[in-house]
Amino acid sequence: MRLHALIVVPITLLLAAAPAVAQWKWKDSRGQIVVSDTPPPRDIPDRDVLQKPELTTRRAAPAPTAASAPEGGAQAKAEAVAKPKVDPELEARRKKLEQEQTDKQKAEEEKVAAARAENCKRARTHLSTIESGIRLSRTNDKGEREILDDKQRAEEMARTRAIIASDCR
């Protein structure tokens, strides 16, 4: 009978301790440690969770060898198994968002290119006007009209050529 107790008691203790592996341990709002087989409430921050149950992972089935599968089929099946499954709706949203961002960036680039082309056209027209030798006038701060002299004409020509160099690429 004594021998029976020596064998039964340790086995019973081991069986009783098995569920203890899948237990949660956390500090509640009062600072007391709580142990349970259910996860803590959502209001408990992750830093207060002291122990989580260990997840048991299943071993993946060994990939079929080339000798046991038809040509090419084994590799395709192995690749399909190796890729993680992605939610199709989530993947569709991600692709749509990427496409929208690409379209938006492309539209912005086209807008900038159109503005540069317009600036280039205006600058070339202005340069041809300056080089033509006709009299040019400008309105000063007082609202009076003043005619450009040779020095001002040369400065305006240099400024216009700089604009052409930057916008007419």
Image (cartoon, rainbow, N blue to C red):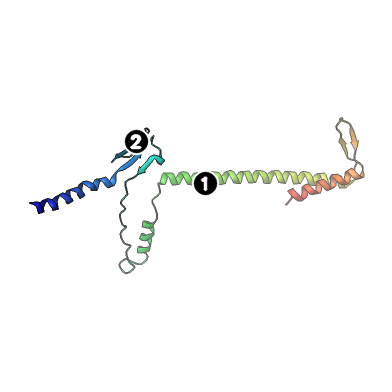
Classify residue 76 by image quadrant. Answer: bottom left
Q: Quadrant of residue 66?
A: bottom left
Residue under label 2, please give it: 32
Q: Give me the residue at 44% from left, 47% from top.
A: 91
Residue name at image x 70 percent, y 43 percent: 115
- Left or right of residue 20, residue 1 in this image: left
Residue 26 pos. (x, y %): 35, 39
- CA–CA distance between discs 2 and 1? 48 Å
- Amino acid type of the residue that numbered disc 1 sits on in the rendered structure: Glu
First in residue order: circle 2 vs circle 1: 2
Q: Residues within 10 Å of mark 1 (few under 14, many from 20)?
A: few
Q: Is residue 64 left or right of residue 93?
A: left
Report which residue position mark 1 lands on: 98
- Where residue 102 appears, as percent x and y from the top left, is 56, 46
Q: Is residue 96 left or right of residue 86?
A: right
Q: Secondary structure at mark 1?
A: helix
Tag count in the figure? 2
Furthest toward the right, the residue is: 149
